Amino acid sequence: MAELIRLESLRVVYSQKVVLDGLDLTVAPGEFVTVCGQTGCGKSTMLRLILGSEQPAAGKVLIDGVQLPRPDRNRGYVPQKYSLFPDKTVLENITFGPETEEFGLLGRLTPKFFKRREEFRAEARRLLQQMGLQQADAEKYPDQLSGGMQQRVAIAQALIMRPKILLMDEAFSALDPGTRSEMQKLVRNLWRETGTTVLFVTHNIAEAIYLGTRVVVLGKESPETPARVTLDLAVPEDCRTETGYPRREDLERMMKQVEDAALGGKLELEMAEFAG
Ligand SMILES: Nc1ncnc2c1ncn2[C@@H]1O[C@H](COP(=O)(O)OP(=O)(O)OP(=O)(O)O)[C@@H](O)[C@H]1O
Ligand SMILES: [Mg+2]
């Protein structure tokens, strides 16, 4: 199987606490991998390692077979606490990435820049429309937008770079249920259309199963032990109905598997004894 991302025996230590140890994972191009696990188990850390903004204490992160020392345009990132530039309009927020990549911060007073800027702006407007935002929103500032709208802008900001890999950290956790399910459909459609490889962290197990072609669970034996992959579950396309959701019985079975893997065998045992 072709592989785009390979995590090899990763170890991460923060102030002498081992957060991840011996973590292995490979992701093929075009997969939509959702990542679940209890709070503090290292999901965001794993995304930052793939992004390249952090390096492991031991082990390797290989992207297309190569270790990369820092983030680049091939890896888009929508962080857990997204932050748009408050002093830039929606349009300026989205075009900042490609403008800076091509012209840096200083090389902007040339005719070529103004021509390219129009092209970036046209692309940003197209993305906004695709994300269900109005053209009038393009001139607004972030604090004039709802959380859901800001989240769409943050996603557009990542998408305009056309990354090969899109890393999203609890991107929908602050949204109301209606907006959330709209955004889920949108991201799944975008993934289908662009073939981008996605890693998506979420606490919502139903969301993980709906979005993912594969659900990876990070779990711990106890709060002191580092997390490892406790479940790597394929979500077969043929268990989905025409709504895109897995059939009820499949969904319930998979949710139970994910829940058990996230809590760890030990906790499950304690609950069973308690229930008995
Ligand atoms: N920069 C840091 N310095 C020290 N400790 C850190 C740092 N970043 C993360 N940690 C610790 O590493 C562990 C994993 O953190 P991480 O943010 O990856 O967890 P998470 O699974 O994303 O949690 P959540 O679901 O709450 O977002 C936690 O114990 C956290 O306190
Ligand atoms: Mg996190």
Image (cartoon, rainbow, N blue to C red):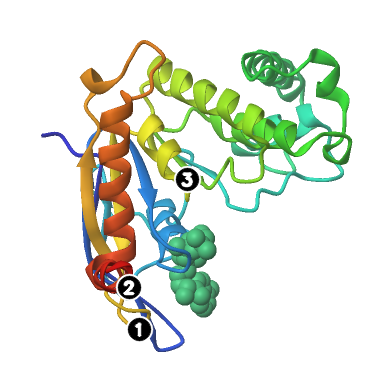
Label annotation for residue 207:
none
Report, in whole angstroms, how far the alpha carbon at label 2 lies from the one at label 3. Answer: 25 Å
* Mark 2 / mark 3, whichever is N-terminal: 3
Horizontal arrangement in the rendering, residue 130 relative to residue 220 (left or right) = right
- Where is residue 203 drawn, in percent x and y? 47, 51
Instruction: Tell me the residue that label 2 is attached to.
Output: 274
Q: Secondary structure at mark 1?
A: loop
Q: In this picture, is 119 found above or below 223?
A: above
Q: Tell me the residue at 32%/73% (across/down).
A: 274
Q: Secondary structure at mark 3?
A: loop
Camera-side residue: 98 or 258? 258
- Mark 1 CB near ligand 1 (8 Å cut): no
Pointer 3: residues within 10 angstroms few (<14), some, or many (20+)? some
Residue 31 visible, this orientation? no
Q: Amino acid at mark 3?
A: Asn
Horizontal arrangement in the rendering, residue 241 relative to residue 116 (left or right) = left
* Mark 1 / mark 2, whichever is N-terminal: 1
Which image quarter is the N terminus in? top left
Which image quarter is the C terminus in? bottom left
Q: In this picture, is 12 found above or below 163?
A: below
Report, in whole angstroms, how far the alpha carbon at label 1 lies from the one at label 3. Answer: 24 Å
* Mark 1 / mark 3, whichever is N-terminal: 3
Instruction: Tell me the residue that label 3 is attached to.
Output: 204
In this rendering, the label closer to the viewer, 1 or 2: 2
In the rendered structure, are the residues bearing label 1 and label 3 in contact, judged by CB atoms less than 8 Å apart? Answer: no
Q: Tell me the residue at 64%/20% (across/down).
A: 131
Instruction: Tell me the residue that label 1 is attached to.
Output: 224
Report, in whole angstroms, how far the alpha carbon at label 1 lies from the one at label 2. Answer: 23 Å
Total numbered labels placed on residues in the image: 3
